[in-house]
Image: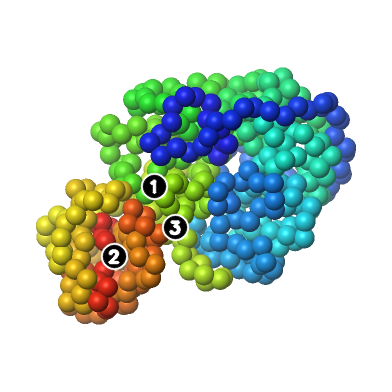
């Protein structure tokens, strides 16, 4: 995610602050050669990359070791790996992810934390994920320029020595090199590559110029032939456009280089109830995300969504409103849940792995029943309102859904719980108790998230009822989806 915006447009809930580009690189010194074991080059078809970014809460621009969302710096390697296994399992099963982009910096790799942090890499490659390791400026770089060449080189020498022989690990020398001119950046990238001749070029991602926004100068430099190209495209870079305008915006800075490009960062709000499956929407974010994912599919480009977890903290919340997943649980007992199923649908569409449109049953729409009131005072809900149930054990919410066949079905229950404690309930299917469900705190009444449960269903109509088991009642309920 860029530390600064490059255009004057700002969304309603700002992503970042502007600041002056500072920092001077005294010389583009020739980087020391590090010899590592050879490895096979990557495939030239970037559609194989179906990924997400796992980030630090507050973003990855840190002058300290990087601790990803869900991790603690006191964690051992075994604990980090167990947590990462749980997170990756959710990424894969719920979204079809096969790639994760992880940050590195000089403070992480030079500290004892690196020995534990490597569990995030090893857990990913053990399950067959591809891993992109990207450097975020951390004081050894500032203002989009490297300011401590020795620390930068030492970090990359360690990382490439340890993972250069692993064909699933890819290297991105610098995220968003916005402090350099095009010629300065391509010179630096070429020096990085020449210093590490044993790393196959097909496993190196060179970012575009600026905030990785324009890959044309990088693609045109013959010294960088054979590398992959890292491309970023956000709505807040370019303001408001119609769908055709967003398609043009996405494609023009690719030039003729889409076959080498991976969209390593793009994203949109996932907690506001936007319907990204609505091709007729006039919402700028919906138009933007639909244009990006349609273009990805048409061009057979891979993509890495920003972020899955972590990222900038949105004002008044404890997470990034762009984040695709909510993180649940504690210790190594972690799970993730998708915040917006239509956003997930668009990612799959971009990857060429669509699934049928998810049936959605709004809590405020008949035949749904809400023992309480239909309210609209907390933003982020879908449709025209949400069910605010009475705070009593006798209250309930009920949905009527249609199942194509008998068996089991996965339900996504979108809710918000602005209290500090969980709100438990019994989930009753067709009059029979199916399971107990706990609706954890979401950090605020606008912090909508989705609880996923698997229940038995019969072919045709089914009633799904939630009965609170304490006098606190149910959380606010937005809708139920049959996935």
Q: Residue at x 51, y 53 (%)?
A: 309
Q: Which residue is drawn at 66% across and 52% down?
A: 66
Disc 3 element: strand
Query: In this figure, which residue is indicated by the disc labeled 2?
Result: 475
Question: Which is nearer the N-term, disc 3 or disc 1?
Answer: 1
Which disc, if any, is residue 270?
1
Nearer the viewer's eye, disc 2 or disc 1?
2
Q: In this view, does 432 lie above or below 107?
A: below
Residue 88 is drawn in which quadrant? bottom right
Find the distance from the CA under tag 3 to the CA under tag 1: 10 Å
Q: In which quarter of the image is the N terminus?
A: top right
Q: Is residue 415 visible?
A: yes
Q: In this view, does 40 lie above or below 89?
A: above
Q: Foreground residue, 221 or 387?
A: 387
Q: In this view, does 295 lie above or below 365?
A: above
Q: Residue 357: where, in percent of width, then height? A: 29, 49
Residue 157 horizontal side relative to residue 373, left or right: right
Q: Is residue 241 above or below residue 168?
A: above
Q: Do the residues labelled 2 and 3 touch (CB within 8 Å)?
A: no
Q: Foreground residue, 137 or 264?
A: 137
Find the distance from the CA under tag 2 to the CA under tag 1: 19 Å
Residue 478 horizontal side relative to residue 112, left or right: left
Query: In this figure, which residue is indicated by the disc labeled 3?
Result: 326
Count neighbours of disc 1 (C-alpha within 10 A) and say few if under 14, some if 14 to 19, many if 20 or more: many
Find the distance from the CA under tag 2 to the CA under tag 3: 16 Å
Q: Do the residues labelled 2 and 1 touch (CB within 8 Å)?
A: no
Residue 26 is drawn in which quadrant? top right
Q: Residue 437: where, in percent of width, then height? A: 33, 73
Q: Residue at x 38, y 36 (%)?
A: 12
């Amino acid at each position: 995610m860029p530390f600064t915006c490059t255009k004057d447009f700002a969304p309603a809930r700002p992503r970042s602050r502007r600041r002056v580009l500072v920092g001077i690189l005294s010389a583009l010194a020739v980087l020391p050669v590090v010899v590592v074991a050879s490895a096979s080059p990557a495939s030239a078809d970037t559609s194989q990359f179906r990924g997400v970014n796992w980030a630090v809460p507050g973003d990855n621009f840190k002058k300290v070791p990087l601790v990803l969302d869900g991790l603690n710096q006191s964690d051992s390697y075994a604990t980090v790996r167990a947590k990462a296994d749980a997170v990756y399992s959710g990424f894969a099963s719920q979204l079809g992810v096969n790639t994760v982009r992880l940050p590195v910096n000089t403070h992480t790799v030079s500290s004892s934390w690196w020995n534990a942090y490597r569990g995030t890499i090893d857990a990913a490659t053990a399950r067959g994920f591809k891993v992109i390791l990207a450097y975020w400026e951390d004081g050894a770089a500032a203002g989009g320029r490297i300011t401590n060449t020795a620390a930068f080189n030492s970090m990359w020498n360690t990382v490439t020595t340890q993972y250069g022989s692993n064909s699933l690990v890819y290297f991105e020398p610098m995220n968003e090199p916005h402090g350099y001119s095009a010629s300065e950046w391509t010179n630096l990238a070429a020096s990085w590559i020449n210093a590490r001749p044993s790393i196959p070029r097909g496993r190196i991602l060179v970012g575009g110029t600026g905030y990785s926004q324009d890959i044309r100068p990088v693609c045109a430099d013959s010294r960088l032939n054979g590398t992959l190209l890292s491309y970023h495209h956000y709505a807040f870079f370019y303001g408001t456009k119609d769908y055709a305008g967003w398609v043009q915006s996405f494609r023009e800075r690719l030039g003729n280089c889409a076959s080498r490009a991976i969209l390593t960062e793009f994203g949109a709000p996932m907690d506001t109830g936007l319907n990204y499956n609505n091709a007729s929407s006039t919402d700028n974010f919906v138009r933007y995300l639909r244009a990006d994912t349609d273009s990805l599919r048409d061009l057979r480009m891979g993509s890495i969504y920003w972020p899955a977890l972590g990222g900038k903290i949105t004002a008044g919340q404890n997470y990034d409103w762009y984040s695709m997943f909510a993180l649940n649980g504690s210790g190594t007992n972690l799970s993730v849940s998708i915040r917006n199923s239509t956003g997930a649908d668009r990612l799959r569409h971009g990857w060429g792995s669509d699934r049928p449109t998810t049936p959605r049953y709004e809590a405020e729409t008949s035949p749904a029943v809400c023992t309480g009131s239909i309210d609209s005072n907390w933003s982020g809900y879908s449709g025209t309102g949400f069910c605010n149930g009475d705070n009593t054990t006798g209250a309930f919410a009920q949905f009527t859904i249609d199942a194509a066949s008998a068996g089991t079905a996965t339900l996504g229950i979108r809710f918000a719980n602005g209290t500090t404690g969980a709100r438990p309930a019994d989930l009753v299917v067709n009059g029979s108790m199916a399971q107990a469900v706990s609706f954890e705190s979401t950090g605020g009444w606008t912090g909508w998230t989705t609880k996923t449960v698997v229940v038995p269903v019969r072919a045709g109509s089914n009633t799904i009822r939630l009965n609170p088991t304490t006098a606190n009642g149910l959380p606010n309920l937005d809708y139920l989806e049959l996935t």
